[in-house]
Amino acid sequence: MSQKEHHTFQAEIQRVLDIVIHSLYTEREIFLRELVSNAADALEKLRFLQTSGQTLHQPELPLEITVVADSAAGTLTLTDTGIGMTRDELVENLGTIAHSGSKAFLQKLAEAKEKPAVNLIGQFGVGFYSAFMVATQVEVFTRSHQPDGEGWHWVSDGAGGYDIEPGEALPRGTRIVLHLKDDAKEFAENWQLEQTLKRYSSFVPFPIKVSDKVLNTVQALWARSKSEIKEEEYKEFYEFIGHDPEPPLARLHFNADAPLAIQALLFVPARNLENMGLGKSESEVNLHCRKVLIQSKAKGLFPDWLRFLKGVVDSEDLPLNISRETMQDSALLGKLNRVLTGRFLKFLAELSEKDAAVYEKIYATHSRFLKEGTITDYEHREALSKLLRFESTFTAAGQTTTLAEYVKRMKEGQKEIYHIHAAHRAAAAASPYLEGPRELGYEVLFSFEPVDEFVFEHLREFDGKPLKPAEKADLKIERAAEGALSDDAARDLAAFVKETLGARVNQVRASQRLVGSPAVVIDSDEMVTSSMRRLMKAMKREDGPEAEPGKLDLELNPGHTVVVGLDRLRRTDAVLAATVAEHLFDSARLSAGVLDEPQVLLRRMNELLERVVAKAP
Ligand code: ADP
Ligand code: MG
């Protein structure tokens, strides 16, 4: 009497199978990940029973997974010593059960017309069926852990149901034999097999053996408790996942339970490849679910500006949520993203207090990313602004300050935070725009990278204090210089200079911000600084400095000897006075870095020098 029973698959499962068999061809190798993760689950369950003191069949068997490829026979066999299945469990788990996920999976496939989401198959609780992507026939030999269990044999070609019959006497656990399709025979080659297993299953917490060799030797450190991990292990782990021989600058290892279950181990690399001109980096944080790789270099896990991070994020919530909701994976990812980003920013803030030297190193290497975040990420702008560092007129060269420290030092009556852009510290310090703040005892932040100005522009304020380019500062120095022009005289002189310069200048007026310089130019556009003009010009924008000459205001220092002298000169020698006025304008533009043709200035200077030397007796 044959004890073979024929069963049909539940309708939904048959549909999943039809799709798996007939239309999924990309990323086929993930079947291996799914079968290994099922084996690992079965071993995990067995370990749990063991620790809870249950009587088990063959308690002495080591907990492990063995994979054997037989290229001659074209088969691949995966064996585990896990809990195994009884006959009823076989029927239920591999053929009938209303796997809640199968419906969601079908829906997801229907939605994704272009590229079926094969990679996600395991997250819908239908991972087992991915075996049919590569096999014409799948056999399952299994024996339950229960002491009175028996061996069972399940076989199916994926269409027309499956057969179950009592099997030979089997050791505890499950053996799955795949009869590979002709075009999938490569999986019976050891190198292909090992490569795929290493890629997806390196952190499975049970040994995976191929030809007696254990493939997964690096542990899933992120899932272990920090206190029992040695530095050496972190180092080895980073080398393995980061492909980086240089030790990282810092690491963040944390667990969270709410709002999502997350285990993460993140590293800040020692090098910034973008700074080295290697193009835009790609995030190297891998997403795992219970130690099994879901996506390497996972997209969307962090905001773009955190793309310098390397590491692992593991979330148990991933599959549950994904199969339960009708595929709001982007919403879930957004949630993960928010939690992870918030946590990492908090980590940096704490590090900057606890270990300033390490933070400075991170900042020196990766500040570009933090600045990019300040500009582009409204949600995290405030947290990021606290991480920014700048040199200033109050710091020693090479030393930096935070914005909060700046605010603490602000003078009474000072309402704004000032900053100035220059190529380097000496150039910034020599700027005429600093004369006013210096006179009033106000600190000015230095920015040496063009991106800084955009950072300030987007930040707009810190701690309620507006951020302002020093050249836009509306500062009045009360102390009048001796022999300075009267307000009326200054106004008349300004009119003369405006007439001389014509349309090249927008407005000429007396300045209240200058001490040592005779003149300064100010962009009449409230939003544009001279360095931005320079940048626009460098980017060959139409509205560069020379393209819009009338955009500049010229301010004259009524207390400066040259300006006072110019006022006298225009009454006796209007032609020479006009030349001096031109020269003041060009020098001010040169100082602001927005003079296009210094040759004109030099020619005029020579003319003036000729007149000076002609005075010699
Ligand atoms: P999931 O793993 O998400 O539950 P699968 O389709 O991968 O979905 O597997 C279906 C079920 O089959 C599992 O839940 C498990 O009960 C059973 N199963 C699969 N492989 C094994 C195995 N190697 N040992 C024991 N049970 C298994
Ligand atoms: Mg599974």
Image (cartoon, rainbow, N blue to C red):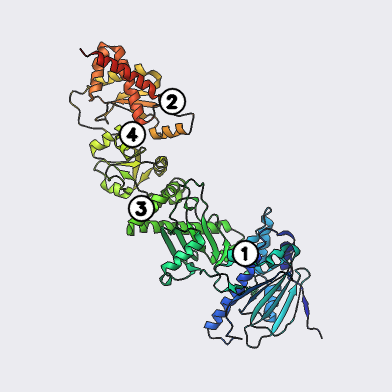
Looking at the picture, how far across and down is residue 49, in whole percent?
A: 56, 82
Q: Quadrant of the N terminus?
A: bottom right
- Measured Cα–Cα span from mark 4 to mark 2: 19 Å
- Residue 457 to residue 188: above or below: above
Depth check, front residue: 320 or 75? 75
Depth check, front residue: 415 or 3? 3
- Measured Cα–Cα span from mark 4 to mark 1: 60 Å
Tell me if 373 is positioned left or right of 92 in this view. left
Q: Is residue 335 in view?
A: no
Tags 3 and 4 touching, CB below 8 Å: no
Label 4 sits on residue: 471
Tags 4 and 1 touching, CB below 8 Å: no
Task: Answer with the quarter of the image where residue 44 lies.
Answer: bottom right
* The label number, if any, that marks residue 360 in the structure image: 3
Q: Earlier in the sequence, mark 4 or mark 2?
A: 4
Q: Nearer the viewer, mark 3 or mark 1?
A: 1
Would the CB of label 2 be found within 8 Å of ligand 1? no
- Residue 573 to residue 172: above or below: above
Circle 2 SS class? loop
Quarter of the rendered structure image containing ligand 1: bottom right
Q: How many numbered circles does the render carry? A: 4
Identify the amino acid type marked 3: Glu
Circle 3 SS class? helix
Tags 4 and 2 touching, CB below 8 Å: no
* The label number, if any, that marks residue 196 in the structure image: 1
Label 2 sits on residue: 546
- Measured Cα–Cα span from mark 3 to mark 2: 40 Å
Identify the amino acid type marked 1: Thr
- Residue 572 to residue 282: above or below: above
Q: Earlier in the sequence, mark 2 or mark 1?
A: 1
Task: Answer with the quarter of the image where residue 497 lies.
Answer: top left
